[in-house]
Amino acid sequence: MALERLGLTDIVTTITGVSDEELARLYGEAEIAIVPSLYEGFSLPAIEAMSCGVPVVATTGGALPEVVGTSGETGLLVEPNNPEALVTAIGRLLDDAELRDRLGANGRRRVMERFTWQVTARGTAACYDAILEGRPLPDSMTFD
């Protein structure tokens, strides 16, 4: 196991099979969330962390920039396969409580505006309406 090989078993805990309530509690205890994916189709871990107000450090792999948003506003994004950039971003957040608070609040706002079931349902209905009426599909991710 990599944790044993790297001597990290005393500081890293892996947890599986938790309830939604327990997961929310665990996110609530986190100072930051890190999503270092090389490629990500759609990142539920980033959305879950952001919805709990936890600031996110993620890579620009796959759809993560679309989920996390603008680096420095709703999270911090770094290039995949760049451990130095990842370490720098993690350190920056751990050293700056004001930045953590701002990114956490902005990230939560982003999730609530773009990724709730209500927003998804409105967007789906708007796409169906556009198709049935022969109009172009909507550009916006928010459908009021």
Image: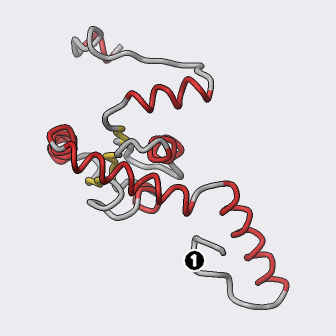
**62 relative position to 21: left or right:** left
Kindly state the secondary structure of the residue where label 1 is placed.
loop
Q: Establish if 79 lies above or below 135.
A: above
Q: Establish if 125 lies above or below 73.
A: below
**22 relative position to 10: left or right:** right
Query: Residue 101: percent from the left, percent from the top?
Result: 30, 47
Q: At 21% across and 42% down in the image, what residue appears?
A: 97
Kindly identify which residue carries mark 1. Answer: 140
- For the C terminus, which image quadrant? bottom right
Q: Residues within 10 Å of mark 1 (few under 14, many from 20)?
A: few
As rendered, which of 82 and 91 lies closer to the eye?
A: 91
Query: Residue 64: percent from the left, percent from the top?
Result: 43, 55
Q: Establish if 30 lies above or below 102.
A: above
Q: So how many labels did they put on this image?
A: 1
Query: Residue 8: percent from the left, percent from the top?
Result: 25, 14
Image-quadrant location for residue 139? bottom right
Q: At 22% across and 11% down in the image, what residue appears?
A: 7
Q: Residue furthest bottom?
A: 134
Q: At 27% across and 14% down in the image, what residue appears?
A: 11
As rendered, which of 25 and 88 lies closer to the eye?
A: 25
**133 relative position to 79: left or right:** right
Query: Residue 38: percent from the left, percent from the top?
Result: 37, 46
Q: At 30% across and 15% down in the image, what residue appears?
A: 3
- For the N terminus, which image quadrant? top left
Rendering colour mode: secondary structure
Q: Amino acid at mark 1?
A: Ser
